[in-house]
Image (spheres, coloured by chain):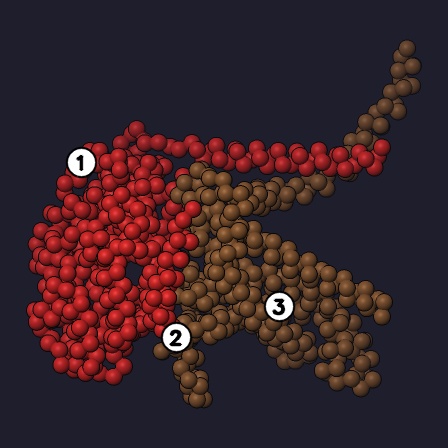
Amino acid sequence: MRTTSRPRRAAVLATAVLATSALLLTACSSSSDKKGGDSTDPNAKITLNVGDFGTFGYKEAGLYDEYMAAHPNITIKYDTVQDGQKYWDALTTHLASGSGLADVQAVEVGYIAQATKALGDKFVDLGKTEGINPGNWLDWKSKQATTASGSLIGLGTDIGPMAICYRTDLFQQAGLPTDREAVGKLWAGDWAKFVEAGKTYQSKAPTGTFFTDSASGLFNAVLSAQPEQYSDASGKLVYKTSAGVKTAWDLAVSASQAKISAGLRQFQDPWNAAFANAKFATVVCPSWMTGIISKYSGDSGKGKWDVAAPPVASNWGGAFLTVPKAGKHTKEAAALVAWLTAPEQQAKVFTKVGNLPSTIGGLQQPAVQGAKQEYFNNAPTGQIFAAAAQSIKPAPIGDQDGNVKTIITDNGILDIEEHGTDPAKAWTNVTKLVDDKTGH
Amino acid sequence: MATHVRAEAPPARPSWRSRLYRFDLKASPYAFIAPFFLCFAAFGLFPLIWTGWLSLHYVDLLTPDVMEWKGFGNYTRLWSNDQFWTALRNTFTIGVISTVPQLLMALGLAHLLNYRMRGRGFFRVAILAPYATSIAAATLVFVQLFNPDYGFINWALGAIGIDHTQWYADTWPSQIAISTIVTWRWTGYNALIYLAAMQAVPKDLYEAASLDGANRWQQFTRITIPSIRPTIMFTIIVSTIGATQLFGEPMLFGGGVGVSGGSAHQFQTLSLYMYELGWPSRQLGRASAVAWTMLLILLLIGLVQFLITRYRKRHELGG
């Protein structure tokens, strides 16, 4: 009897242990479900948490301090992640579990379709929030953050109309014009002319330099200007037959084969270093890129860089501020978001870090229109970018676009550049990877 | 009646107390270890079972509450997927070229540190310094060193006439670079474990050996190695587990293409493949299938190591 009773007791204990742990688990989860809800006292002291990535410029432009001074009961805390992809990975996990969310969360344009499609009901509808007029923003910008049922889940922060930044010293040595009007005319109207200019450059280029930084950057720029991109209006992936993707892919491949690209991967260490070493003469350049160029080219590049109009106007980047429903102070958070994205504040951010306003009023601010950048040979960047912004024709974005773009640029074009893979084989590989990563 | 009760009561009370005592004796150990098993159940067992359940479904990361039954579909799909096999092969090759030199160097270092020498304490602390460095900090430094255009390593190799090496783009160079980071971080750690084991080897064995005319190398192979064999086995097992789960170093080394392990997946490990499926691709079910496959691979390796040890023990006892 004793020998048999011992295991039984152990089993009883084990069950008890498991049951207790289950209780503990449920206790934990139920306590976290009790959310504070909106505070009823408007003067109660509250803390608003803001989560973003990269450089939004709010801290740099002193906007948090300004807001806290005007609202003494509010304390703003912010948490910035450098890598946008990692930020989004964490945010989706938090949204799925409904915990760990800040009161205000930034969402990059590349992921906004995922947010509106699969996660639309997890955000506050800012279109119905008092004091917010969706008509203040560029029409296509607000549309990107609107769900199928018509709720506006994010307010646009900045946009990324593209120009071409180029080095006048390298252009001169290669016998190309250096004046920004003349440079713009070199390729006006067609990205293929840009590649042709590259071949001209390369034939007389200073040794060790290339016309442009990366074929992937070129692909991205060309594609952004196409009316048809990865997905159709219904959100279905059409990249295999898309005329836009084919145009961009062929041009990028031709650039790589003509060896006018330095074959670097953007935003990586070797790319950063290549700025300081003047390894390439042009880079496709949304307004936010000017900050990166001046940072990495440093004093040696000052006055040597200039900005010219792009072959075709298009948009690269830009973000939105959202208010997750799971936050504790959604009302106050919405008010903060509305204030941060208002034209005056957007203009202040632009003058500080170069993020171009996404509101019509913001683009018209004198601080934006009259902006010149000393680093870029006093180029009237405000005018160049604002002009590009007006002629952008938006294309539909699907919720898998970011994924497809990463595979095409990182496992397709970069593979061709690094390993000399046959383009046809690289494309087959891309379609295989996309099928694998997006299918059920 | 009263006397009758009193006569019966005394035996009853001790029996209750002794039963309590016996219960205490038996149950207390369980109560004391309970916190661990509670935590294990909550943070180890439950996720394990849940992951297994997820691996049989199609689950989108954004809507984890919606599940679509797939059976073993996620596993069979792995079987026919080139990228999975590439990742498995990479995990194996990176594992071998980082674990083997790492443990051999650790053995050598420990043997040297075991001698009487000046500043022994300093060296013992110094070799542990890489282990105390964060992966991120260490990897960032190595990324700079291995930069094909401006890095120190290509410059140094160039000085002795070795051509430009593509440390990021080519398969073997990138895997060797990653192994270097792993080896650099863990050699000292393993050396200290070996050193601790070596200190327990009786000194008279060495004295007797040196009286018999054995040199240091012979002492090392004939006395030290056999004496610390269980410790070596332990480090092999721990390093194998670590190598199978290698994630941080290749991820950070690859920078923006870290998740896919380079443009042609040339250094993508299984953990990275799992992460790529689960997060950027949002395929939680298939990522879980990779997680379980990794667990099964580890169990398999463990079984092989166990069988080898048992065979060797029997063989030695028999011989």
Please say whether residue A383 is visible from this viewpoint: yes
Please say whether residue B188 is visible from this viewpoint: no
Q: Which chain carries label 2?
A: B
Q: Mark 1 lies on which chain?
A: A
| Drawing shade for chain B | brown
Q: What element carries label 1?
A: loop
Q: Which amino acid does label 2 sit on?
A: Asn
Is label 3 or label 2 in front?
A: 2
Q: How far apart are marks 1 and 3 (CA)?
A: 63 Å
Is label 1 or label 2 in front?
A: 2
Q: Which chain carries label 3?
A: B
As drawn, the residue found furthest toward the top would be B1
Picture disc at residue B19: none
Q: Report x, y in % for residue A427.
A: 34, 63
Q: Report x, y in % for residue B21.
A: 79, 34
Q: Which of A237 and A327 is in front in this view?
A: A237
Looking at the picture, does residue B35 appear above or below residue A276?
A: above
Looking at the picture, does residue B151 appear above or below residue A381?
A: below
Q: Nearer the viewer, residue B43 or B240?
A: B240
The first of marks 3 and 2 along the sequence is 2
Q: Residue at x 61, y 63 (%)?
A: B240
Q: Report x, y in % for residue A29.
A: 49, 35
Q: Which residue is drawn at 47% across and 63% down?
A: B268
| Drawing shade for chain A | red
Q: Which residue is drawn at 31% across and 41% down?
A: A117
Q: What residue type is labelled 1?
A: Gly
Picture disc at residue B190: 3
Residue A170 left/right relative to B209: left
Residue carrying label 2: B147
Residue carrying label 1: A131
The quadrant in which residue B148 appears is bottom left
Callout 1: few (<14), some (14-19), or many (20+) C-alpha neighbours within 10 Å? few
